[in-house]
Image (cartoon, rainbow, N blue to C red):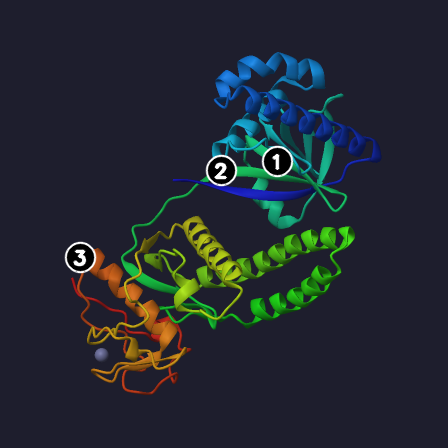
């Protein structure tokens, strides 16, 4: 299957080229706003119909290269797919590029990009590291977005790669939550502390800015939320990378379908519900993506009492959950870390779904020795199963 990935590259333009790009941004933005106005006033949102009534004018008025005029029309048509009740305007400094508007040029001393502008085509070196260079090797990207942030130009290049996905037969349950950020039935565990404490620092800064309420404070606030997201992203990448490295060929990931359940069940008191559900969804996405890169498939199952079901006797009761972290079955006495129990239940759900029976349960912590074997590596878990 084809897997697409976005590689973000800093550009190193000369002052003259920066000017050209900014001028082109302006023309592209003006064109989008013009097309948007026509679309909204005449109630024409279909891209082809919109093309007929705006293309010629767009090129003449804003002096855009042909494909940039098409990209502007596409962006407007796409924006109106979401809502049509108000006139939409282009706010950020960014523009879409296709294979006619940009390409990569490989030189022994680095990679350049050639981009169409309202003036001439220009060549700009990419300021990238080894990691990005690897990702850009032997690819023919057909789509990119040029953006401008903190006085820096970024090129977000979409690259496609073919991966072979193995047929997994060893389920690994994955549970995400606040206290233990990620717990998996193969023994992997990542605590949530780091992401939360960073979040805390941002929150203090934010509330002081909110109290000020001036225009400049508002601008700072907006920048902050972007920085906060990028910072959280970095952590999510690290956690998902470490976890995916712990997987083996033949594993298949089993995850909860995240549909807001975490807001109510796991952190009722939290005012950060939105942030957390965003982070959890993102984490799942990163895990799924990175696993697929290694050919490891993932399935999402509808969560069915995964946090309150006993993995040994099947007893379902809220009373099984003695605390945020402790699970002890009221029927058979099985006890273990609650997040780990959830990941085990996901593992069993997948076995049931794929029609296989469990012969042996993972034997860790079976008889009350809570947490003793909790950090044991996956190889020590008994995950064998019958046919
Ligand atoms: Zn039980």
Separation of residues labelled 1 and 2 (CA atoms): 15 Å
- Closer to the chain start, of discs 1 and 2, is 1
Sequence-earlier tag: 2 or 3: 2
The N terminus - image quarter: top left
How far separated are the C-alphas under marks 2 and 3? 34 Å
At horizontal 49% and vertical 18% (from top left) the residue drawn is 48
Residue occupied by mark 3: 355
Find disc 2 in the rendering and name its residue.
Answer: 160
Quarter for ligand 1?
Answer: bottom left
In the picture of the structure, the residue carrying the numbered disc 1 is: 145
Secondary structure of the residue carrying numbered label 1 = strand
> Is any part of residue 218 visible from this angle?
yes
**109 vs 76: above or below:** below
Number of the front mark, 2 or 3: 3
Residue 189, x across and y down, in percent: 45, 71
- Cα–Cα gap, marks 3 and 1: 45 Å
Report the number of numbered marks.
Answer: 3
Q: Residues within 10 Å of mark 2 (few under 14, many from 20)?
A: some
Q: Residue furthest right?
A: 15
Which element is circle 3 on? loop
- Tag 2 secondary structure: strand
Q: Would you place residue 192 above or below residue 31 in this image? A: below
- How packed mark 1 is, by other alpha carbons closer than 10 Å (few <14, some 14-19, many 20 or more), is some
Residue 51 place in picture, x, y as percent: 54, 17
User: Do residues under tags 3 and 1 come within 8 Å of each other at their CB atoms?
Assistant: no
Q: Residue at x 66, y 68 (%)?
A: 201
Query: Where is residue 306 drawn, in percent x and y?
Result: 30, 67
Res. 115 in view:
no
Q: Quadrant of residue 86?
A: top right
């Amino acid at each position: 299957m084809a897997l697409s990935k976005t590689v973000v590259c800093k550009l190193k333009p000369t002052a003259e080229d920066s000017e050209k790009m900014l001028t082109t941004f302006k023309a592209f933005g003006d064109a989008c706003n013009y097309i948007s106005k026509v679309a909204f006033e005449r109630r024409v949102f279909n891209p082809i119909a919109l093309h007929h009534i705006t293309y010629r004018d767009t090129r003449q008025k804003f002096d855009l290269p042909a494909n940039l005029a098409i990209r502007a029309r596409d962006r407007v048509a796409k924006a109106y797919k979401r809502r049509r009740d108000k006139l939409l305007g282009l706010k950020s400094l960014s523009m879409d590029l296709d294979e006619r508007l940009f390409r990569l040029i490989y030189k022994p001393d680095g990679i350049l990009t050639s981009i169409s502008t309202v003036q001439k085509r220009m060549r700009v070196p990419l300021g990238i590291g080894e990691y990005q260079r690897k990702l850009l090797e032997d690819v023919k990207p057909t789509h990119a977005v040029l953006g401008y942030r903190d006085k820096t130009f970024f090129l977000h290049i979409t690259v496609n790669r073919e991966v072979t996905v193995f047929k997994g037969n060893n389920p690994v349950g994955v549970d995400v939550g606040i206290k233990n950020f990620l717990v998996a039935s193969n023994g992997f565990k990542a605590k949530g502390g780091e992401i939360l404490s960073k979040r805390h620092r941002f929150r203090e800064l934010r509330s002081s800015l909110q109290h000020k309420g001036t225009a400049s404070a508002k601008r700072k606030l907006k920048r902050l939320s972007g920085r906060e997201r990028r910072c959280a992203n970095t952590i999510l990448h690290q956690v998902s990378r470490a976890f995916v490295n712990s997987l083996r060929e033949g594993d298949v990931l089993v995850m909860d379908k995240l549909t807001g359940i975490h807001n109510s069940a796991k952190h009722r008191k939290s005012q950060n519900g939105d942030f957390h559900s965003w982070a959890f969804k993102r984490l799942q996405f990163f895990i799924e993506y990175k696993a697929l890169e290694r050919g490891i498939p993932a399935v999402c199952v509808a969560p069915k009492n995964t946090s309150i079901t006993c993995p040994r006797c099947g007893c379902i009761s809220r009373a099984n959950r003695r605390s945020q972290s402790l699970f002890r079955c009221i029927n058979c006495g099985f006890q273990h870390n609650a997040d780990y129990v959830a990941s085990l239940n996901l593992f069993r759900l997948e076995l049931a779904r794929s029609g296989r029976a469990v012969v042996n349960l993972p034997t860790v912590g079976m008889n009350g020795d809570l947490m003793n074997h909790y950090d044991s590596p996956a190889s020590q878990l008994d995950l064998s199963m019958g046919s």
